[in-house]
Amino acid sequence: MNMTLSRGGRRGARLGAAGIAILAALAGTSTAQAGAAAPRAVPAGCSGASPVVCHYAVPPGTYDVTVSVGGASAGQTEMWAEARRLMLPATRTAAGAVATYAFTIDVRQPEGQPTGQGGTGNPGLDLRFTGSAPQVSAVSVKPADHPLVAYLAGDSTVCDQPAAPYTGWGQMITTAVAPGAAVANHADSGESSGSFLSNPALFPALLAKVRANDPVFIQFGHNDKQTSASAYRSNLTSMITQVRARGGVPVLVTPPVRRLFDGSRLTPTALHVNGVGVDLPAQMRSVGAAQRVPVIDLTARSKALVESLGPSASAQLFLRSSVDGVTDNTHFSQYGAARMGELVLQSIREQRLPLATHLR
């Protein structure tokens, strides 16, 4: 097999030859090839059968990844990258058919939460193919050339949660992002607007990577339980100012609701009125208007969803002891994170934010 390297753009890192198979035959997105015979062995860099796990020893950077799923027998395959970022939802292939998909993936170390909570993962790019009958016939990895990178700044409801059942919405929107754009999830569990802003491993590290026209989605509130209105507004305004100075596009995201009901309605605590009486989503909307920054009102959108389901059915969005082994009315199940991600993506499309033209 020929080993080929490509020189990437400003974010693509220079690759060593080890573990990188550039397969020229792989091109395009979502193209089915009926009757194409897949190799019996898994691609170079991969091992296992269910799941199929692939590792490529690349330095941090942004990479174009093309995969072909399917083979001689019928299959059902999901693809996850790095710290449980869903790239390809469950996809069925008929016996003898191969489907090819392309993605642009952010690789960093640590690969999950920036402070290393839950583990730092493996250096390089990790792909994991799961499903009832995962089939992988080819994988291509090469540095991306001038991709748009959407940065996420937030807390545990956003972040790349390393272990199930906990799932952040930032791990699920990746399925909707077309090649040529990547999601770089720098959210971190337990962070408030102030702690994220001041920790060198968090906002300063994110900011150093932002380039012209990169959107930066900023969601805080869950952990601003005792933050004053003036401090909260100051923290958000500082992030906005610094992102703009780098040429990026700041976007504010109000925090998703907690599942705390009073009858059929969510409580003020669920709606992020904090311990000192500050209506955090209202303050964020006000900052957005004052700074002329787009606001995704995830509080309002998630409130409508959770209240429409009611106290009982809404439990499926969060963690349940009967299913997940833990009851948690703040953090999402995989299903709940996917639903929250859908609300974020809907608003991105409606407001025609920079990522909108890069969505599938």
Image (spheres, rainbow, N blue to C red):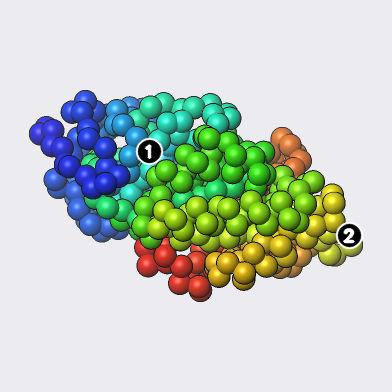
Task: Place residue 270 in its image quadrant.
Answer: bottom right
Q: Is residue 132 left or right of residue 94?
A: right
Q: Is residue 119 left or right of residue 111?
A: right
Q: Which residue corresponds to the image point at 40% horizontal and 35% vertical from the top-left? A: 108
Q: Earlier in the sequence, mark 1 or mark 2?
A: 1
Task: Place residue 209 in its image quadrant.
Answer: top left
Tell me, yes or no, if residue 260 can be seen here. Answer: no
Dot 2 corresponds to which residue? Answer: 262
Instruction: Tell me the quarter of the image containing the C terminus.
Output: bottom left
Tell me the amino acid under the disc marked 2.
Asp
Q: Which residue is nearer to you in this view: 194 or 321?
A: 194
Secondary element at image label 1: strand
Numbered badge on residue 107: 1
Q: Is residue 123 left or right of residue 241?
A: left
Q: Which residue is nearer to you in this view: 234 or 285?
A: 234
Q: Which residue corresponds to the image point at 40% horizontal and 50% vertical from the top-left? A: 210
Q: Indicate which label's residue lies in the foreground, 1 or 2.
A: 1
Q: Which residue corresponds to the image point at 23% horizontal and 57% vertical from the top-left? A: 28
Bin the neighbour count of mark 2 within 10 Å (Cα to Cα): few under 14, some 14-19, many 20 and up: few
Instruction: Tell me the quarter of the image containing the N terminus.
Output: top left
Bin the neighbour count of mark 1 within 10 Å (Cα to Cα): few under 14, some 14-19, many 20 and up: many
Task: Place residue 37 in its image quadrant.
Answer: top left
Report, in whole angstroms, how far the alpha carbon at label 1 lies from the one at label 2. Answer: 43 Å
Provide residue 120's location: percent of width, then percent of height.
49, 27
Q: Which residue is nearer to you in this view: 291 or 111?
A: 291
Provide residue 178's location: percent of width, then percent of height.
35, 58
Tell me the amino acid under the disc marked 1.
Val
Provide residue 287's location: percent of width, then percent of height.
64, 64
